[in-house]
Amino acid sequence: MTMYSHSKLSTFEQCQLKFKYRYLDKIISETKSIEAFLGTIVHDTLEWLYITKSKENEIPSIDKIMEHYANKWEEDDNENVLIIKKGLIKKDYFNKGIKFILDYYMKHRPFDEKTVGVEKRIVIDLSESEGHKIQGYIDRLVHNPEKDEYEIHDYKTSNFLPKKAKFDTDRQLALYSIGVKELFGKDKNVILIWHYLAHNIKICSQRTDEQLEQLKKDILELIHKIESTTEFPPNKSALCSWCEYNSMCPLFKKEVSNIKQNTEEKTLDIWD
């Protein structure tokens, strides 16, 4: 059996060398971008909100939520959390998370949806004959008893808001909907919902059964490509500066070397 995830597939598509470092060489990087760190703390806080409400049958106050957020930030913060963007400090990102959570709290309280799971693990059989499976974790799964349908909620802390067409072709939540249908019935309607916290909006989409079947075929094709790959070249993109492996990437090292060389040449020109 081979287990994959949306993240694993996306890493291969983004940069094959990064895929090799992470999933084949098993190189664990201690560094994390401040954006990724912020996303983790915000996700943890919203997860805590719904778990606490479920256990205590009472909505935690905004003060309690902020206390949890601040404590979790302080507990997990370390020197390996890196800021790439110039002119910003950790306090700026901390305050951004405060705003995300406050806006979400004010917009969605009293949180009376029927949440049936947070960070719910799902496993999808892509092919019984080949043994390929996909696993993932749903930020929050909701059951709407009036419509007898399920909602997959996903939190995004990115400032970038994609166009609507992107959500209608998004692979991650579509994959999760396959898992939800396998758990609760293939006839169930599943709504995909993204919460873009920086914009305080939610975006919804759906997939037909035919689209989901095609998605499984497309993923199997991608897995076949991954498993037949023997060369893993780097791929230069805007994401390179945030990559935890850029210190060992030959492409990134070359770029840094060229910048240094150009700087030295300009300095010599000044003194000539």
Image (cartoon, rainbow, N blue to C red):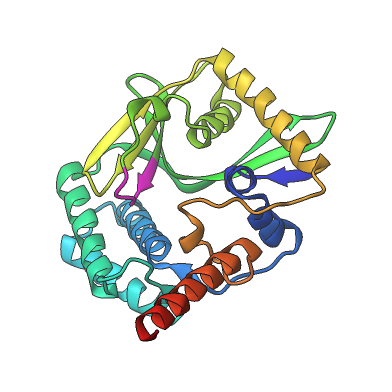
The residue at the point 48 percent across, 68 percent down is 32
Question: Residue 11: x percent and y percent?
Answer: 60, 49
The residue at the point 17 percent across, 66 percent down is 63
Q: Is residue 159 a member of the stretch shown in magenta?
A: yes
Q: Quadrant of the N terminus?
A: top right
Question: Residue 227: x percent and y percent?
Answer: 80, 42
Judge left or right: residue 189 versus residue 48.
Answer: right
Q: Residue furthest left?
A: 106
Which one is in front, 232 or 1? 232
Question: Residue 113: x percent and y percent?
Answer: 29, 37
Q: Is residue 253 above or below residue 147?
A: below
Q: Residue furthest front?
A: 272
Q: Magenta stretch?
A: 154-160
Question: Residue 69: x percent and y percent?
Answer: 29, 67
Judge left or right: residue 230 versus residue 209.
Answer: right
Which one is in front, 65 or 163? 163
Residue 33 sits in quarter: bottom left
Which one is in front, 144 or 230? 230
Judge left or right: residue 211 versus residue 71.
Answer: right
The residue at the point 28 percent across, 51 percent down is 57
Q: Is residue 36 above or below residue 187?
A: below
